[in-house]
Image: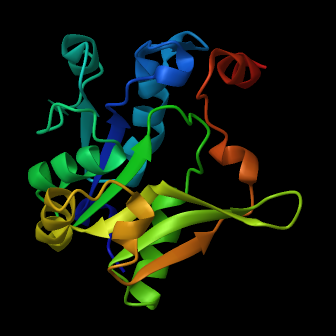
Amino acid sequence: MPSADQITGLILAGGRGSRMGGVDKGLQNHRGLPLAMHALMRLQPQVGALLINANRNLGAYEALGAPVHPDSTTDYAGPLAGVLVGLEQCQTPWLVTVPCDTPEFPLDLVEHLARAAHEQQADIAYAVTLEADGREQSHPVFCLLKNELMESLVAFMQGGGRKIDAWFAQHKAVGVRFADANAFFNANTAQELAQLQR
């Protein structure tokens, strides 16, 4: 099973924040700290190294204390563009990604994903929760993936691919069930951020 020091953590903070009125989501205040800082502090004990993917306010993100890398494309190509940057910069066999807007994700996220990837010999392991109505909800931006998938992702994106699940489908990807769906509650809008504060 991959150990923490074989895994680099990537905070995805490169989005447009369009559902939050275009603000830089990762820098929004949550209990006195930027959202991205919560993600960083939560992920740090679980991995060997940390990176941030951001496309605006790079100085503010650098002040959080981890190397910051913008997308290599300029069109806000979604989370996969951030994942690609992470794979390009990652010096470890594995990369784990978390979005900047979900400050309560599980403290054992990486351990669970790593165990599942190891046991099922998977290239990618991502989080899944059960909704109140019994449906499975996948959280593909919470994923652990092999560094060696970089070429595959480059080819997928060069072919115009943007959807994360379509790329996952090209590889052995396993969904990993987490019991607490609330841990994956994310603040996409100002209302959801207010809900998080409560």
Q: Position of residue 64 (x, y in %)?
A: 30, 21
What kind of colouring is applied to the model shown?
Answer: rainbow
Q: In the current view of this chain or complex, which residue is farthest to the right?
A: 133
Residue at image x 64%, y 46%?
184
Quadrant of the image containing the N terminus: bottom left
Residue drawn at x 34%, y 42% is 78
Q: Residue 97, percent across and down?
A: 37, 51
Seen in the picture, residue 79 relative to 111 is either above or below; the reply is above
- Left or right? Give the position of 100 relative to 87: right
The residue that appears at 21% across and 20% down in the rendered structure is 62
Q: Quadrant of residue 26?
A: top left
Q: Is residue 197 left or right of residue 15?
A: right
Q: Residue furthest front?
A: 160
> Whole-percent x and y of residue 44?
37, 42
Can you say whether 106 is above or below 167 in the image? Answer: above
Please state, as top left, top right, bottom left or bottom right, where the C terminus lies in the image. top right
Residue 23 vs 141, above or below: the answer is above
Q: Is residue 74 left or right of residue 124?
A: left
Q: How many marks?
A: 0
Q: Residue 191 or 40: which is nearer the viewer?
A: 191
| Residue 135 image position (x, y, % from top left) | 79, 66
Residue that protrudes farthest toward the bottom in the picture: 120
Is 87 rendered above or below residue 64? below
Q: Residue at x 17, y 46 (%)?
A: 85
In this view, the residue in front, 139 or 180, is 139
